Amino acid sequence: MKKKNGIKVAIVADSLIASGGAERVIDEILLEYPNATIYTSIADSNVIKSHFPNNRVVKSFIHYLPFEKHLRKELYLLYPWAYRAFSFLGFDVVISVSSAFGKFVRPWSRKTKHILYCLTPPKFFWMKEGRTIKDQQRASFKFYSFFMDTFLEKIWQYWDRKAARKADKVYSISNEVRDRIQKFYGIDTEVVYPPVKVSEIKFRKDNDDRENWFLYLGRVERYKGVHLAIAAAAHAKVPLKVAGTGSQMEDMKNLVTELNAKGYVKFLGAPTDEQKYELLRKCKALIFPVREEDFGIVAVEGNAAGAPVIAFKSGGTLETISEVNPKTGVFFKEWNALDLAQVLEDFDPDQYDPFNCRKQAEQFSAELFRYKLKHIVNDVLISKKSA
C-alpha cells in the first residue's frame, strides 16, 4: 500500500506496551505518513487502540511466546533476532525509533533505506553506573549478572554498535544523546529534537494568576527524583503536588509520613492530558529533578504552559531550559534534597515571564519535528535514487 507522497514507510518501535516518549514520536511520524505499517517486538492492545487504531501493527514472535509478560527482561537475548526476522520488502524507508533493539532491523534490500532515530544507546549496556539497588534485587538483573563485565557482554555491545552503524542515517534526540552515540558507537549524528505538542497547550500569561504550590509531574520512581522533590518540599516547608503513578508510590507516601510532611505534599494520581496542562498553568513552578535525562518532554511542556522549571543541572534539560535571557527556569546543581530545598526557598516567580517560557518551548514543537522529518526522508530517498 502506497503512503503519503507515494512513499511506502515502515516504523519500528522497541515495544508498544505503555504510552511514553517513543509513542509520541511515532504519533507525529504517522501524521506525516498516516498509512505506515508499524513493527514491534511486543505490544499491548490498549496502547494500539489508543495510539494506532488505523494502522497495521506487526508483532514479533516474542509477543506470542508463553509467559512472555513474566519473562520480558529474561527474553532480551532473543530481541535482536526478532527484529532481524522482519521483512521490509517493498518498503522505501524504515524508520526505527529506538532506545534498545529496534535498531537491529535489517532491510535486506539496498532499495530500502533505514533511518535510526536514537532516543539513547541502551543504558543497560552502556551506562551501568545508573543501576540502582532495586535493579540489583530483580531476577532479571541477577540473570544478567552472569555475563556482565564478561566477554559475553562485550559481544552484545559489539552487536549493538554494529547495528547502529549499519543504519543509512542516524539522528539523536538531544546533544546529550548525540555525545553518548559518539562515545559508544563512534558515529557523528545530527540532533532532531522530539516533538512536543506546544500548540495544543494553553498558557497562563500572568504570573498573578498562578497558585502558591510547586508541581512534580511524572513517574513516581526514585530514579526520576520524586523523593528529592518530596524531601525538599518538606525541608523548605512549601506545598507540593505530585501528579503521576509508579511502582514506588507506597514508598513515597511512607516517606511523606516519615518526614511529617502530610500538610505539604499531596498525591494526585495519574492526570489526563487536560488535567496535566491545567496543573502546569496553575503551579508556581514545575520541579524536574531527573538526572542525565535524555531530553525531558515534561520540562518543555511546563514552559509551554508558561511555567518556569526547576531542574537538575544535567542531561537534556541543559538544552531546553534557560537560566539567562530569556530566563525560563533555574537549576539546582547537587542531586540532593537540601540543594533543591534552597532553590525552593529562594524561588521568585516574578523573575520569569510566561511569554519567554512559551517562546522557549516553541523551539521544540511537533510542527518543527514533522518539517524536519519530511526533509530527512526526502534526502534519504534522493540519495537512494542517485546510488
Image (cartoon, rainbow, N blue to C red):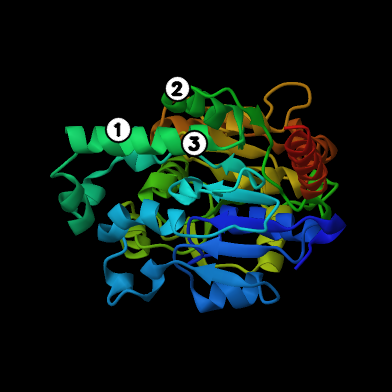
Badges 2 and 3: C-beta atoms under 8 Å apart? no
Please tell me how crowded label 1 is: few (under 14), some (14-19), or many (20+) other residues with Cα within 10 Å: few
Give the structural element (helix, strand or loop) at label 1. Answer: helix
Residue at the location (59% across, 33% down)? Answer: 317
**Amino acid residing under circle 3:** Ala
Where is residue 50 drawn, in percent x and y? Answer: 63, 74
Please tell me how crowded label 2 is: few (under 14), some (14-19), or many (20+) other residues with Cα within 10 Å: few
Residue at the location (45% across, 22% down)? Answer: 183
| Nearest to the observer: residue 243 or residue 83 | 83
Give the structural element (helix, strand or loop) at label 3. Answer: helix
Vertical position of residue 121 compared to residue 286: above or below: above
Badges 1 and 2: C-beta atoms under 8 Å apart? no
Separation of residues labelled 1 and 2 (CA atoms): 16 Å
Sequence-first disc among 2 and 3: 3
Which numbered circle lies on residue 247? none
The residue tagged 1 is 129
Residue 79 left/right relative to 371: left
Quadrant of the drawing holding the N terminus: bottom right
Please tell me how crowded label 3 is: few (under 14), some (14-19), or many (20+) other residues with Cα within 10 Å: many
Give the structural element (helix, strand or loop) at label 2. Answer: helix
Residue 133 left/right relative to 235: left
**Amino acid residing under circle 2:** Lys
Residue 85 left/right relative to 189: left
Quadrant of the drawing holding the C terminus: top right
Badges 1 and 3: C-beta atoms under 8 Å apart? no
Separation of residues labelled 1 and 3 (CA atoms): 22 Å
All told, the count of numbered labels is 3
Sequence-first disc among 1 and 2: 1
The residue tagged 3 is 164
The residue tagged 2 is 183
Vertical position of residue 332 compared to residue 101: above or below: above
Observer able to see residue 145: yes
